[in-house]
Image (tube, grey):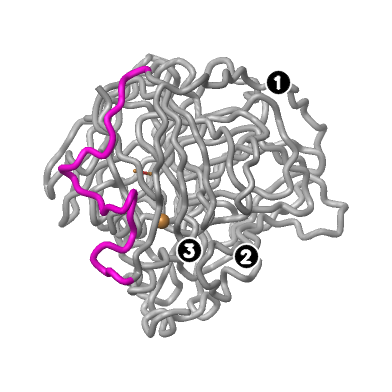
Amino acid sequence: HGTASNVALPAADSLGLPRGLPLPALSMLANQGGSGQFVGQLQAAPVSLPLLPGKPATTFWAYNGQIPGPAIVAWEGDEVNIAFANKLQQPSTIHWHGMPVPAEQDGNPHNPVLPGQQQAYRFRLPPGSAASYWYHPHPHGHTAQQAYMGLAGVFVVKSRHDPLAHLPEQWLVLSDLKLDAHGQIADSSAADRHDGREGQFVLVNGGWQPVIALAEGERQRWRIWNASSARIMKLALPAHEVQLVGTDGGLIGAPRHIDTLLLSPGERAEIVVTGRFATGQPSALQALPYNRGKAMSPEQAATLTLATIRQAGSKATATLPDKLRDITALGEPAVKRVVNFSENMANPAAMFLINGKKFDMNRVDFSGKVGQIEEWDIVSQAHMDHPFHIHGTQFQVIARTDDGVWQTEPFLAWRDVVNIPAGETVRLRFVQSMPGLRMFHCHILEHEDAGMMAMLDVR
Ligand code: C2O
Ligand code: CU
């Protein structure tokens, strides 16, 4: 599977991107001193960064000149005021992915920031909103390009009552980089626009296969973001002990032992990793083969090493509380809806569809009410997986099919992205707490740009 332009791309090893360096630290834009205000600036502009030794610098589009963009750290209750300047040659927006922000502040495609213009985004972080979010552009038709050129950053909202505050943290932003023979970011091929774009490199905080230090017995809290356009990652840390402690919308009720973690594009997780080096297993963060329904490329069929874990002495094992948070199940819905994901390969102008339609900025697909419990069945009539995402709120997955057989979800969690495997259905519930237009779409950004997106109008 693949087009001529894919075949012509150099293999990762031939490009000379350095690996084995320490995990790059994210630069921070942090709220100083708990003033209740977060004020910051983000500028999107082209930037050239030396990436490959002995080659010309690589041109990215970056927030504040950094890949990934600066990590924003704020607190529950903060008033956020971020001035955005668009220095690109095309319209952009900033979407505050997963955050409960007013619709007109959420960087929808309806509110573009034109080249050379500025916009102030303002919103308040409500109590209970502590979680690992992110921000990225959302202009319709150019989201995938702006994201793969480098525009993405993380936004962590902290709580003053965090039961895991005693653990050291690592923040891992996973992104995908596709380079041409000159070390420049490659254009997307027809296959990329169809299957979703994957590159030769999965980067962690902008570095390739970095080294993470962990002590024997040490417990670290890792926040992981899948900021790639299209790569569904089945993550594993074979040697070490791993507990899932959080999802897109923050902590779950109690830690859960896991062997693998499926993270689809746009999705986040928090895990607690306990260092165990005497196992004979590879000490690495891996992405295992995952069949997302399309023909698997050799890269997808292989196990990728995303980072190696180096033993840094040994440490006493910190306690992990049994209980993390109270999550109340959403009750019986006032409205039930069906959302169909389908593909029409025979029509290149409308290939990826929701309820048989391509996105139209002027068409409201569903009307909803503030405070009303909605239950949606996301039904895949597609041949590949499509991760579902909705703006403005978090949802609870109630049940899903596995080979067509319904399974009740084993635990409560707040999410804003859920993968819909080819041919399966996922049932979820949510409440929108603010009025306005809310997008929902596939988070394979090429599919979103192609029109696999629709709108809920909340009154
Ligand atoms: Cu992360 Cu509508 O997007
Ligand atoms: Cu999709």
Q: Nearer the viewer, mark 1 or mark 2?
A: 1
User: SS class of the residue under badge 1?
Assistant: loop
Give left or right: position of 230 versus 401. left
Q: Which quarter of the figure has residue 96?
A: top left
Mark closer to the chain start, 1 or 2: 2
Residue drawn at x 61%, y 70% is: 301
Is 177 drawn above or below residue 411 in the view shown? Answer: below
Q: What's the CA distance linking mark 1 and mark 3?
A: 39 Å
Give the residue at mark 1. 323
Query: Percent from the top left, x then y, of residue 193?
Result: 34, 67
Q: Amino acid at mark 2?
A: Leu
Q: Nearer the viewer, mark 1 or mark 3?
A: 3
Give the residue at mark 2. 304
The reply to whether discs 3 and 2 touch (Cβ–Cβ < 8 Å) is no
For the C terminus, the quadrant is top left
Q: Which residues are magenta?
A: 346-371
Give the residue at mark 3. 383
Q: Amino acid at mark 1?
A: Lys
Give left or right: position of 234 versus 215. left
Towards the viewer: 149 or 287? 287
Query: Is the C-beta of the residue carrying label 2 under 8 Å from the nearest atom of ligand 2?
Result: no
Q: Amino acid at mark 3?
A: His
Within 10 angstroms of label 2, few (less than 14), some, or many (20 or more) residues? some
Residue drawn at x 36%, y 55% is: 445
Query: Percent from the top left, x then y, of residue 195?
Result: 42, 66
| Residue 173 is at least partly visible in this image | no
